[in-house]
Structure formats: C-alpha cells, structure tokens
C-alpha cells in the first residue's frame, strides 16, 4: 500500500500543490489531499473545512477550483454543507482500522464446495510441449491467410458490427457451419439450430444449464474427458461414470435402471482418450433408450474431421431422424485453440423453447472473428486446410506408431490413433503412469496419464495418451527412446 | 429428412456408382449405399454381403475399394466378418422406427427450472436503436486504429500465440489493466490479481462460481442490473433484493440479520440504472459489515470512466487496504461491445487460493485480441480515445437533458446522467413505463422501463432509462417529442 501522509488541517493550507496549467489537475490534487485527510482522521469528523476563499488564497489557486472540489466531496458524502460552511462527515471508523481486523472465515471456504469436487489436473504443460494431446500443428496453420480474412471482415462489416450482435452468433457463420456439418459429418440441421459458443467447453456447459436441474444424473465416459465433469459439477449434477470398452460407451440395463440419466456425454466417433468407435448397435440402442428415458445425448465430435483410415465415421446426430442428440463441435483442433470458437447443434424440437433462455445467457460478440470464420469456410480455404492437415497428421501418426514399435522397450498395447491427434498406449499395471507423465513434463514432454481420465480407474486404465498433432515427425524416435527409459524407471516395487 | 431409397441386395449390385478417378470417392459412395441399405432393412439382419470379388466386378470398381469398405463397415459394427464371409449385424430396430416414437416428456421440462426463475426481459432492440442504454458511440470508435493494432499483434506474436495461452489471460494485458486501473480508478492491484473474462457478465459469473454454494444468499440492488440475477440463479443462490435510494444501496441492520449475504453486488460509482453514487459513509459501512459477516462485495464499475462533472468517483476496492471487494470492469463501454473483453480483480488474500479452480474453469484464448488491447492501452491510444468519448458523451448528456426539459410535457424527475451513457427519468405511477417502452421499440427507440429493473417494484420505480451514448445530439429533440406523446398515451385509466 502507498503510505498516506498524515496532514494536519494547517498542513493542508501550507504545503503547496504541484502547479499545472490544467485546472482539472489542480482540482484532482486538492480532492485527493482532502479525501485522504478525512479518511485518515487528520481532518476530524465534525470539524469545519477552511472557507473556500481562504483556502484558494493560501494555495494560490482559483476559488472555483476549491468550490468545485467541495461540491464533489459533498456529492460523495465526505462533507456536508451547513449554514456555517462545510463540515466533515462522521464516518464509521471500523472499515478504516488497520489493526485487529475481524474477518469471519470459519465455515466460509475461499472457494465453493462444488469446485472442491473437481480433483486438480496434472500441472499444465506449455502448448508446444512435445506429445501434448489435443494440440494441432500450430506452425502449419495458414496465419497470413487468417490475418487477411480477419482484416477483410473488419473492413467489410465496419462499425455496424461493433455492437453485441445476435446472442446465438453471426447468422453467416451459423449458416456456414450448418452447410459444412451436413456435408462433412452427416449432421442434419438448419442454421437456426446452430449456436455459436466459446469452444466445446462452453457448448457442453450450455447443455448442462439448459437441460438439467440440480441433482439430475449425468453420465460420463470412464475413462473420459475431464472438462465435462467440471461442467456437470458446476451445474450441481450427480456425475455417474459409465465404462468404456473396445466398442465405446458400454451402458448396461442396470445403469439405466439404477442411475437413469438426464444427460449422457459421449465421444462416439473417437472416444476420448482411448480412441474406440461407438458401434452402430450401441449407437442405435443409446438413442432408443435415451428416447424412452427422456434423456439427452451430448455428442462431442471434437476431432473426427481427421480420420486416417477408411471413411469418416458419421455423426450420431444424423443417424436417425429426430435423434435426441445435442451435437458439440469446435474449431480448436481444425483451426487453432486460441480462436475459442465452438458450436452446439440443438435438436429441432428443442430449438424454439431454448431461444429465450439462450438469449438471457449469451451476449454475442467476437463478430469480426465469426465473420472471418464464415468467410474461411465459404471460400473453401477451411476445407483445403483440413485436407492438408489430415495428410500431415496421418504421417505423424504412422511415424509415432513406428517409433513406439521400435523403441518402447516394455510390453504395451496401442489403441486408437486412427483418427484425430492422439493415440493411447496401455501399459502393464506395475508401471506408474502418473509418475511417467510427471517425469516427462520435467523433460519438455507432455503425455497424459491414462489413469487421470478415469473416475473409477481399473488396473487396465494405465498408460499414456500421446499427442502427435503438434510434434514434428523427426522427433518421435528420440522422444520415444527417452520415454521408454522413463517408463522403465517408473516400475512399482 | 432426406428420403432413403430402398435397395434390394440385387439393386445394390445393379445400379452403377458415379465414376470418379478418386478411389476415395468410389469408396464413400459404396459405404453410404451399404450403410443405408443396412439401416433401412433392405439388407436384412444376418444376411450375407456379396463376396468382395463379385461386387467389385459387378460395379466395375477395384476389389481393394470393396474390401476397404467392408473393413470400415466392420469397424463401425454394421457387419461382422465370419468364416463364410461378411454378415449384416442384428441392430436394435427401436431407434429406427419412424412412427409411434415414445418420448417420455412428463416431468422433464425442455429447459431447466433455474432458467424459469428468470423472467424474460423486454424484446431485444437492435444495437443502433435510438436511446438504447449501455451502447457506446459505435461510429466514433477508431476502428482503423484497432484493425492496425490487431494486425500488428498477429504479425508480432505469430503462430506461438495460436495455442490456449494462460487461462487467466495474456500477461501483457493483465499488467496493462493493473496499471491503468491504479491510475484511473484508484484500484490497488498487481497483475496477478487481474483475471481476463468474456465481459463483465462472465466476471460476475466467476465470482458466483468461485465463492458461493447452492442456497447461499446474494444481495442485488433493487432496482438493479438484471444480468447479476441470472448469474446468481445459475449458481442456485438465493437472490435477495436490497433497496437503492439517493445514496445508493441501502442495507438495514435487519437485512444483515435476516438475510446475511455471501455475495453483495453493487454499482457504487454509478448505480445501474438510477445513477446514485454510493456515499462514503455507506461504502465504509458496507466494507466493515462485509468483513464481519464473511461476505464478499462485487463492485461492478461498468461505465465510471465517463464522469461528466467533478472528479471521477474512486473505486471502493481502493478505499481501504484489503477491502473484501472483487472489482469487475469491462471494455464493452470504453471500447466496443462485440470485443467481449472484461476483467475481474481478485482481492490479494483470495488470489492464490482460486488460481487452481480458475485454471479448471477458464480456457484462455482470444490472445491476439488481448495483445492488441494491451498495445492499445500501453501506447496511450486508449486514454486518448476515452478523453474524446468523455467530451462527446458530456455534450450528448447535456443535449438530452435540455431536450427533456423543453419537450417532455409530463411531470417528471431526471436522475443520474452525471456519469456514463444513460440517465433515468422518473414518471408518476399513472403512466405505464412498460407500455411506453414497448410502443417506443416499434418506433425505433429503445428506452428501458425502470420498473423492469426492480424485483419488488415500488410505485416510484416507474420511468424510463434513456441511453445517450449511441444517439447523435441532433436527434434528441425530435425523439423526446415523440416519446412525450407515447408517455401521455400510456396513461392508466
């Protein structure tokens, strides 16, 4: 804290102000001096301020400056004018006491209980740490083209787009996304069903806030994406983990009976993190059961634009008519993470009813970025960029797979990697995956521990999730060699 | 829904594919044809697919294309290879039934109960509607300078800033805000206390999520800002309205006793919407009581950079050392709304404890915009822009006041307007302010009804909140003339 000099009423009159031709500056100085003197008690409560004429003469300033300052102090309540002049207000001195301040903290934790339910994640790695899952190839992004698209959007839209805009997002972008999704992902939707959000995380959070009440049950994949648990806890839902196997989310009749869900979160095209594809039988069953139970499915389709083998796996949303599915997508992987642009596709039947609550919750904005993104899609630049990245990631995935085969000198199984930006290496239970991840982080590598994704980890939920999106091909061999040493060093006694 | 042609297994062999030199295109066509035939039942469950050689010959395509397609269908679970060939999976037909679909909707409202607590606001006006409160002068924003700052930020930071970045915001912007606030608003803070948010609304929502548990009491000003009620309801807090008078928020001993708050929301420098300044005595009392009760004050300082008379009213946050105050600010008024950039200043004692939960909740991003904003502040462009806007708004405020004096032909009282972008006109109770606002909206004007801001409206909470930020000076006289007619027409019988 800046020390506050104690001024006697006399000192107030004696010490000169810093001369300035700007009358506003003189007034500010006088205001601050008087304010401090009142707050620190050197101008006692009830005492009278000097007459404006006397003070103006003593300080060699204009009398107007003094009267304006007194009026302002009166407006804030520091002083009160009366017939004899201007008196200092009696102020509660409790807040001003510097010592022995009472603050009741028992029973009032600094952070809310709901946040304490979220177990902290591993220390956050730098975006460019090697093998970090979920980060696209940043240096391959066509930044100059994006910069031009943004510049064009600002010049084209002009100051008319400085206001809030449509809370659900720029109409041009919603239309471009609807067209792209129907072609690339088999999603059935019209532009009015598309809601622009701050990345997939906000889209998921919107689902929770729109469709759940406190105490409702939310199913999450186990192991699965941590962010959805945070969003459900924030909405005071009961989070129930449901196991994932080689065919994806594996809900039993007992699950439906004992924990009937309100929301079901799933990553059907590329399970995060283990890479399973939800089989067509399970997809149809999940849709049928969700309909019967009045539940909603949140389909997070975070990186399936990058399919490395065969045809893309189509979205669940488009599989049957009127599926009870909220489709969530993001441009974090297909464009770049700091764009913070994602979207939610509402089911047709839900769209009209949630329009008003969405307008209450969302504020629009980021309109130039959204217009530039619409332009990027409509001009074909987005599709070309996706094609280039798909080839790049395919090559990196093969190189990582080969490096693991050659240099990971422990028994292991590779899962996934046929899609997206990461694959998963399962390890025998006697290696400590969290230990490996922590050791790796200190060496500039950021694989994630598989066990960290599970709420009720089994012995088999042990291994490493390795990102290959943002790591150059030539580094995989030396990185895996180092990793192999760390894995062996982590062996539990 | 796109109609799905029914194909017999024979038709599958007979109708040719569209020839394309791209093998991927042929594979996609075959995949889609088989997928549809399985889903619509024309390829019966348990039936066998044609041999790959036979199908390749019949369709005159490469056998590799057929085997790759079969493998892909098997990976998704549409078919299963066995010793005799490839068989169609038995799929649950429930989800595929088009008629008589059962959906349990009783007891499962389309939107959650917590959202139903928020009464819908008035229809949303266009940003450029005349007299709309809270919108800055968009056509006076130096958009070309901003475009250059953004362009410079992208070229300067490059692809290194495409990743998520610090979840709490770009360090350069947090430092620039801390410096600006200490000089312009008397806020005491270091850069690590500043958290970048999506506008003031997200900053308030962070306070609720960080510091409250469901059922905790939140005080809001009555009349007051609607957005804070939405944020508190979303956090399942109990919202308690506390009256506002000419000296701002007026909490009695009974309020403290009967509804001890966890959070207190206030707009001390310029009460929204009535414009009162929270007096120094009440500020000190609020701080002292909050400390005693373990409550936190959310100080929303949304537009007090634009003070039209006397010195700026300093922030409560800086009034005394270690005030239990979370200071919220926004660039929506000082820059432009669609920037969606606001900030929260954490109390020193709270900052370390909430770092981890904030990193869980926030994703960073918008880094180029944040870097451009930091540059705008550090280069002095921001302060110069504020000075120009302050002069503009001062002139507009005076012109509106004059127009009301001349042309509003009903008894009324003007409040506020000495700060920011709006003033409030109180009207006698026999005029219907909601009626006036609705009529005005149909005529391109967007004043807000004062009664709409109150949770427990008194008869005196009747009038119009008029924005002058984005309305040109020469329009006030004709607008007020029209408004005067609408006011008179709204008289209750």
Image: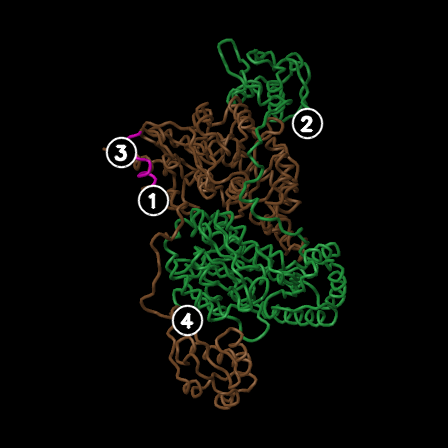
Chain colours: A green, B brown
Residue A267 pos. (x, y %): 52, 63
Q: Which residue is mark 1?
A: B443
Chain identity of mark 3: B
On residue B92, the disc is 4
Q: Are marks 2 and 4 on the same chain?
A: no
Q: Residues within 10 Å of mark 1 (few under 14, many from 20)?
A: some
Image depth: mark 2 or mark 4 in front: 4
Task: Mark 4 vs mark 3: tell me if same chain.
Answer: yes
Residue B245 visible somewhere in the drawing: yes
Whole-angstrom CA distance, mark 2 to mark 4, is 73 Å
Direction from residue B5 to residue B492 in the image, left or right: left
Q: Is residue B416 above or below residue A319?
A: above
Q: Give how far across and how far down residue B83 sits, in percent.
A: 53, 85
Q: Which residues are magenta?
A: B429-437
Q: Residue furthest front?
A: A493
In the image, are marks 1 and 3 on the same chain?
Answer: yes
| Residue B491: mark | 3
| Mark 2 vs mark 1: in front | 2
Residue occupying image coordinates x 52% and y 79%:
B25
Query: Contact (CB < 8 A) between labels 2 and 4?
Result: no
Query: Does residue A12 sit above or below B438 in this rendering?
Result: above
Circles 2 and 1: CB distance less than 8 Å?
Answer: no
SS for dot 3:
loop
Q: Are marks 2 and 3 on the same chain?
A: no
């Amino acid at each position: 804290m800046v020390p506050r000099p104690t001024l006697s009423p006399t000192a107030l009159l004696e010490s000169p102000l810093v001369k300035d031709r700007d009358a506003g500056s003189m007034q500010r100085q006088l205001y601050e001096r008087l304010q401090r003197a009142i707050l620190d008690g050197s101008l006692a409560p009830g005492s009278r301020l000097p007459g404006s004429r006397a003070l103006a003469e003593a300080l060699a300033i204009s009398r107007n400056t003094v009267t304006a300052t007194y009026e302002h102090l009166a407006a804030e309540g520091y002083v009160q004018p009366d017939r004899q002049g201007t008196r200092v207000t009696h102020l509660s001195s409790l807040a001003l006491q510097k010592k022995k301040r009472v603050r009741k903290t028992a029973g009032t934790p600094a952070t809310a209980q709901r946040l304490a339910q979220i177990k902290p994640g591993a220390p956050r790695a730098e975006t460019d740490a090697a093998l970090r899952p979920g980060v696209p190839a940043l240096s391959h992004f066509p930044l100059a083209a994006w910069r031009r698209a943004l510049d064009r959007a600002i010049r084209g839209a002009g100051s008319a787009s400085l206001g809030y805009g449509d809370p659900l997002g720029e109409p041009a972008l919603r239309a471009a996304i609807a067209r792209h999704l129907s072609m690339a992902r088999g999603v059935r939707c019209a532009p009015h069903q598309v809601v622009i959000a701050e990345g997939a995380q906000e889209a998921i959070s919107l689902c929770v806030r729109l469709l759940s009440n406190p105490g409702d049950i939310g199913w999450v994949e186990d192991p699965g994406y941590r962010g959805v648990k945070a969003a459900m806890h924030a909405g005071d839902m009961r989070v129930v983990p449901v196991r994932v196997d080689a065919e994806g989310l594996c809900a039993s009749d007992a699950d439906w009976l004992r924990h009937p869900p309100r929301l079901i979160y799933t990553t059907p095209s590329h399970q995060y993190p283990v890479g399973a594809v939800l089989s067509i039988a399970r997809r149809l069953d999940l849709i049928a059961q969700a309909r019967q139970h009045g539940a909603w499915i949140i389909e997070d389709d975070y990186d399936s634009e990058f399919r490395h083998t065969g045809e893309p796996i189509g979205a669940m949303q488009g599989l049957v008519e009127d599926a009870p599915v909220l489709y969530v997508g993001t441009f974090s992987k297909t464009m770049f993470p700091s764009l913070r642009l994602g979207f939610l596709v509402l089911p047709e039947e839900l769209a009209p009813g949630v329009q008003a609550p969405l307008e209450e919750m969302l504020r629009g904005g980021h309109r130039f970025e959204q217009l530039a993104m619409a332009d990027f899609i409509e001009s074909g630049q987005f599709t070309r960029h996706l094609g280039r990245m798909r080839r790049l990631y395919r090559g990196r995935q093969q190189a990582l797979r080969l490096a693991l085969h050659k240099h990971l000198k422990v028994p292991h199984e590779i899962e996934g990697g046929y899609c997206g930006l990461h694959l998963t290496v399962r390890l025998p239970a006697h290696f400590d995956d969290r230990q490996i991840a922590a050791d790796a982080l200190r060496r500039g590598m950021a694989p994630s521990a598989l066990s960290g994704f599970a709420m009720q980890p089994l012995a088999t939920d042990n291994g490493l999730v390795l990102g290959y999106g943002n790591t150059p091909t030539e580094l995989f061999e030396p990185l895996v060699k180092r990793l192999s040493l760390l894995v062996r060093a982590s062996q539990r006694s």
